[in-house]
Image: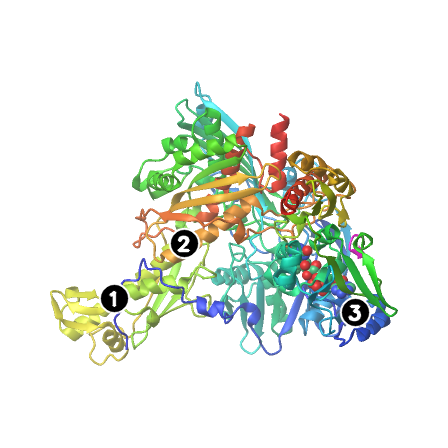
Amino acid sequence: MYPAAFDYHAPGTIKEALDLLGKHKDDAKLLAGGHSLIPMMKLRLAQPKHLIDLRKVPGLSGIKQDGNMLAIGAMTTHWEVESSSVVKSKLAVLSEVAALIGDPAVRNRGTVGGSIAHADPAADYPAAMIALGAEMVCEGAKGRRTVKVDDWFKGLMATAVGEDEILVEVRVPVLPASTGAAYMKFPHPASRFAVVGVAAAVTLDGKGACSKASIGVTGAGTKAVRAKGVEAGCTGKKLDAAAIEAAAQKAADGVDVQADLQGSVEYKSHLCRVFAKRALTEAVKRAGG
Amino acid sequence: MATVAAERLFGKSIKRREDPRFITGRGQYVDDLKIPGMTYAAFVRSPHAHAKIRKIDTAAATRHPGVVAVFTGKDMTGVNSLPCGWDLRKEKKIPGVIQDLAIVPHMPLTSDAARHVGDPVAIVIADSHEAAVDAAEKVQVDWEPLAAVTITEKAAASGAPKLHEGAPGNVAFKWEIGDRAATDAAFKTAGAVTVKKRIVNQRLVANAMEPRACVARYDDATGELTLWVTSQNPHVHRLLMCAFVLGIPEHKVRVIAPDVGGGFGSKIFLYNEEVVCSWASRKLKRPVRWTASRSEAYLTDAHGRDHVTDAEIALARDGKILGLRVKTTANLGAYLSTFAPAVPTFLYGTLLNGVYAIPAIHCEVTGVFSNTTAVDAYRGAGRPEACYVVERIVEAGARAAGMDVADLRKKNFIPKFSGAFQTQVAVVYDSGDYGAAWDRMLQMLDYRKFRAEQEAARKQGRLLGIGFSAYIEACSIAPSKLVGALGAGAGLYESGKVRVHPTGMVTVFTGSHSHGQGHETTFAQIVADKLGIPIEQVDIVHGDTGSVAFGMGTYGSRSASVGGTAILMSLNKVIEKGKKIAAHLLEAAPKDIDFLGGQFQVKGAPGKAVPFGVVSLTAYVPHNYPEGLEPGLEETSFYDPSNFCFPFGAHACIVEVDRDTGNVRILRYLAVDDVGNVINPMIVDGMVHGGIAQGVGQALCEGAVYDGQSGQLVTGSMMDYALPKADMLPMYETDRTVTPTPVNPMGVKGAGETGTIAATPAVVNAVVDALAPLGVDHIEEMPMTAQRVWKIIQGAKAR
Ligand SMILES: Cc1cc2nc3c(=O)[nH]c(=O)nc-3n(C[C@H](O)[C@H](O)[C@H](O)COP(=O)(O)OP(=O)(O)OC[C@H]3O[C@@H](n4cnc5c(N)ncnc54)[C@H](O)[C@@H]3O)c2cc1C
């Protein structure tokens, strides 16, 4: 269907964009790749009166290394993340996550910032951002602030970004030494969003035991969460198959699992455990374990 | 001037001539049409599954800027119900009918109550699509929501909410076929192994790539109405609309179905929207256009399948099938769609004999109404449901009898025959060699080797399974007399006109309609071969009642066998007339003329010949011409087949089930099909490939799901309704056997639906086989989503 009528703005600077946002407030929506927003508008589930397109705002896209961080501009497309040589060499798992999003058309339009700001409960990046310990840089009239990923996802499609702010950058630490990371996803048969997706980053100590495990779970609940129980179950252990199996049992703890056509609470909780196990197994392997 | 073609094209995989137009975006679809003065329609639809309409207030919508008119059902005085073209009423003395068909009204815009989500109640017409859509949101309907029933087994249960006054208990009809007494006796045979299973064939959505659309233009000066509509059969649309619904003169109506982006059955039927737009165009004297959104397509395109069946099979100790008993409830949705009653009866019950020698069969079908979108023919239509029942219950029978599923099938095949095999369920098969296709498939598969691999895999805990399906289907629908006796409101012949232009170029007008089938290629192959001219000199025209004599359209794999034969008959007439002209020019008798390689020549005297182009020119410039012969070279034929054709084949599927998630992955898929002679192997392969994908889709992921409480369609978008994707499918291994039909002169049977029919049971049987080590011997429901399979695994573990 056609969306309801709206005004379109294409600001040329971040300041202009922020001014428009300040002026139209609730009536306005930022437009990035449009691959979540436009479908909602076409179904008239969203009816913003003003669209503020970020595409002409300079400096919002691109990937660069900044010390031990990769700085990814909010407007960087999934395809750019997927194909970036710096991502592939420093943080291959993120490129793998991007490659699992939708299809090529979606990946060529959709953006990292759009995905993280939209916080679809079944989106892929959120699990990875949690596991990798990302931070989000938001800019408002008063300047920039940085939000840690653990403070970012607030609820169903709700994040820490202020109504008068723009997410401008996502900063992701490159993998430390002796660390492996992996993302495993059970795709929705129709949309290919994650029914359940688990990202795991595991650091091994000199003796091959896990010194740090960081696990994000997406898809099953209303928002992506950190699987603290699994992390605790891994830390200090030598992660053989049995230890992984045991730790993964806690993967659905703290997830407000939602039943739908794709799965009952029981099934989705089970999938959280299965994919935690698979992500951990691969992460440990990649860490050299 | 016509030149002579070099080689025979029948049987050649020449590339589709229509494709360059489609793949470069130059197809002309209904929505591409631009007409001055166009108005745009939006429909106001029920958000409720079942609700009384207390009042409709259109004032605010009418005031919306750009709105031309708003109409409700009350405005459409003198307009009748949409017709049901298959009449199962008792007084028609139709075999098998044990309860009258309840012919319930289906008004183009309902004004008493809405009976499914999406039921249209008003049309808003505006100068722009946007204005129409915006204004439609301003139409105020005062609804009184009623309890709804969507679930097939519950629709006719006592206390279920009643949909129609004229259909007590929500029963549309009861019908039976076969021999009840003989079947009962077969099940009492001493020592027989009997198995009874519930087999559910879930509801599907056709999902044609192009959504339905129409443009209606009434010309006040001439009194003519032109309707462009996404139709598989424009003449049928015209007839039904003129004669039954609007009561307008048929000769003043022209229906055009231009390029149509897929149908799968869903574009056979006469729908509310084109009727309302046609009516409104006459009223407003302006063109009215409507194109469905994808959401509307999900809610209003006729759905398919939706059967719940209890099937029983009786086997002798040696594995011979003794009898088959089938009881089916078919959900017809809220209204009777155009051919709805035929699908779960004559297109279903008559195929239950399968490829097996079954001595006794009895089948009972109850058609029920529910608060869901109407159900009608969907690729295969009735035959996939029949094949699914037969192939699943045969499988269950083999397992119960402890026999190999392949051996048991082979043991029961009808032996090779040609001409006639009388089934237990009315129809007579035309020709078949079921064992040959089966053996070829087993050979490609290397069955014994697979079983050994499976054994080894099972020892490692892997769940590997194989599933078979030996199918039969009824194509080239159909002998008019026969279907008339069974309740059809129409004849099912086809017309084909061959117009030879003076220069020898040819235009063919066919009543078949291509919406993906490739007629512009295959029909041209037939013509080029027969007349010995290059294919470039042949054009195929279809889809326009203004230029095509008459047509029953395309469905039921009938185009090559029925439409193609009509063209062939006209070609023969052209040649016969050409012989008279040539004989005159060559000073010989017509009986002494042969037509060979594009030349008319005197028998035994190859030197004495005239080319086709000279004869065609002479027909139009008849200076030196046979006495009494009419000028011109144009012939029309109507072909009414003497029987259906019955393609068959053997499919096999190997799957692996992920124990942890329940996910099913197809490792191999084999298909050996027998569709009779093949005009264009590449196009037939395409049909088989696409059909298998659709069949796999039903087995693994597709399904229209209604919320049991609210009656909302939960799978109403492509984000929710899972169509099969390329990465779910392996590279198919295909082959063919060729058993020509004696029914038509080309020996072609039909290839449009075979894959869809065969694939679904093959895949499900494979999953059952994969889970067999866990004690699973049957799966009741589809699609086999990961969750469903996982639950079955959990259930089996718990036992
Ligand atoms: C067919 C299809 C399949 C898909 N499959 C997947 C999948 O498998 N996995 C997956 O993760 N996603 C999937 N998606 C979603 C896709 O990744 C989207 O691109 C993404 O969720 C949103 O990014 P966008 O750039 O398109 O944002 P938009 O749609 O433009 O915006 C989304 C929301 O975020 C807000 N927003 C955007 N940018 C900013 C910003 N910089 N600051 C603050 N707010 C902002 C917007 O105002 C809007 O509310 C799919 C989408 C489609 C259409």
Q: Which segment did they paint magenta?
A: A155-159
Chain for disc number 1 = B
At x 36%, y 52%, the residue is B641
Label 2 sits on a secondary structure element that is: helix
Check if mark 2 and mark 1 are on a common chain.
yes
The residue that mark 2 highlights is B685
Most prominent secondary structure in the magenta stretch? strand
Q: Can residue B98 be seen in this view?
A: no
For the residue pair A133 and B414, the one nearer the viewer reads as A133
Tell me how many marks there are.
3
The dot on residue A49 is 3
What crowding class fits label 1: few (fewer than 14 Cα within 10 Å), some (14-19), or many (20 or more)?
many
The residue that mark 1 highlights is B575
Chain for disc number 2 = B
| Quadrant occupied by the N terminus of chain A | bottom right
Q: Which amino acid does label 1 sit on?
A: Ile
| Quadrant occupied by the C terminus of chain A | top right
Say if B678 sits above or below B167 in the image.
below
Say if A61 sits above or below B103 in the image.
below
